[in-house]
Amino acid sequence: MKKIVVQLSLVLLLVLALPVSFFLIQQASNLTENEEIVQQAFNQQLETILFTINQNSENVIMAWVNQLDVPLDCSSATIDGVLSQLMMNNAAIQEIIFFDIKTRQKIKQHSRMQPLRIGEPSEEMFNSLERSLLQGYRKVDTHNAGEFTVLTFRLKAVKPQVLVTITLNNKTFIEQNLGSGIQQIAQNRFSVSITDTLSRQVFYAVNANAGAGQTAYKQPMWYVPGASASIALLSATITDLVYERAQRQSYLFAIMVFLLVLGIVFVIITIRREVRLAEMKSEFVSNVSHEIRTPLALISMYSETLLLKRIKSEQKASEYLNVIHQETSRLTALVNRILSFSKMEKKKREYHFSDVDVNELIVEVCDNFEPHFKAQVVELNLKLNSQMPLISADRDSITESLINLIDNAVKYGSFESKKIEIRTRSADGDIYIDVEDNGIGISKKHQKLVFDKFYRVTEGNLAHRAKGSGLGLNIVKMIMEKHNGKIVLNSQQGKGSCFTLIFPLKKN
């Protein structure tokens, strides 16, 4: 049996080890691949975010273009009002200049302070914008001028045909028109900044210091030449995120493995318990068979002798009848014990509680044991407290418990002179009945197990010296539980054992 348990345990552990090993190997091999996949997805997300920032800048500039492209004469006072309103609402616009496309001459100039003289387009720019308009789309050219950017585009509705340049302050344009959008994008997740790639001047930044240690994704600004927008994660790098995700998966897998290990351990423990129970049942059947066979053999032999009248004297006949009576009683007790255990296992045993005088009950049981004490040469000592109160108990069950304890005290008593002492006392609101012997005692490793069903101590030749079914103490334990009490063992190997029945006092 033990060999089967060991083999089954090894198989279960192997079944557990294979998927765990496979997962760990696969996790290690896929970590780099996962990092690359996450990096690609992350870059696409960052590219989309930066595209949104550029799209916002384009929306602002195209709104300016549409605001200027109205069917008005450039020399009219109305267009001056449009220019003034546009510059007043947009602090980034430093200068707006109108040019006649045909003559290449300046028609109108509207400056915030003094003219900057940086917004005059080249001949090539005139031609390029004219070609784009002929092709059906409006093009806005950009030109870097240090801290300024010059936007150049052609108007359709204004008469005569006009080319317009708008000079912007880069930093003011980004702060005023893109700042709120960048803050909304960044929140507490990203570090976003717009920087001049040549001078390293930072036009605008959100959470810049927090994300300084991370790898940033960059994209050039469409309408601010020489500037680039960069974005990075605040909390961790991609590698950290991948490892964090892998770690979470590992934790979940570890929990699953732990639960699986618990399940396997539970299965192994259950199998071992069942194997041990099967062994004890087998031993129980063997012991009971032997105990039944012996009295039956004696009864058969002596009854046959009496039937055949092979008796020489009446004294011998009386002796034979006495043996038959004793063995019949022994056999009846064994059968009753097995039947009692079966009823208790099936929870079919009935208990009839009444007031019981424990001293009276002990004397009655000991009187019935008197012939057995004489045959085994047992010295009985009763120390019964005369002031014991009554307890509420099932009289037959308590009688059976005392019989089991006294019978064990006789069987496992000292080889030379058997002594049994039975005491009663009350303390702390409980009633105590002690059954103490001077026998071989029970070792500590067996003390917790002797109350299990079918369990018997078989060290040395104990199993052959004292026959039993392994049910007695288990029956006593179940009886005490039904009485809301308990049984306690105090034993020293080689010095004897003391079993104590503890009952709660009867409630009035």
Image (spheres, rainbow, N blue to C red):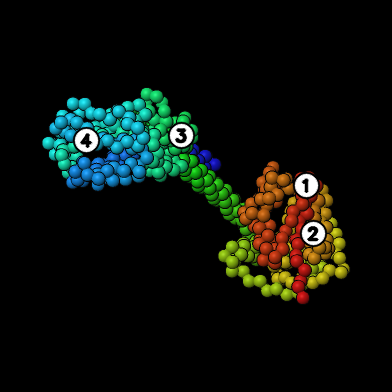
Residue type, mark 4 in image: Ile
**Residue with the mark numbered 4:** 107
**Residue with the mark numbered 1:** 492
Please tell me whether residue 19 is drawn above or below residue 392 in the rendered image: above
> Can you say which quadrant of the picture contains the C terminus?
bottom right
Q: Quadrant of residue 28?
A: top left
Please tell me whether residue 241 is drawn above or below residue 288 in the rendered image: above
- Disc 2: CA contacts within 10 A as few (<14), some (14-19) or many (>=20): many
Give the CA distance from mark 1 to mark 4: 120 Å
Residue type, mark 1 in image: Gln
Give the CA distance from mark 4 to mark 2: 124 Å
Report the side of 155 relative to 64 (left or right): left
- Disc 4: CA contacts within 10 A as few (<14), some (14-19) or many (>=20): some
Q: Position of residue 367 (x, y in %)?
A: 80, 66
Kindly identify which numbered label has been placed on residue 434: 2
2 or 3: mark nearer the eye: 3
Task: Say whether disc 4 or disc 3 marks the residue closer to the N-terminus.
Answer: 4
Residue type, mark 2 in image: Asp
- Disc 3: CA contacts within 10 A as few (<14), some (14-19) or many (>=20): some
4 or 3: mark nearer the eye: 4
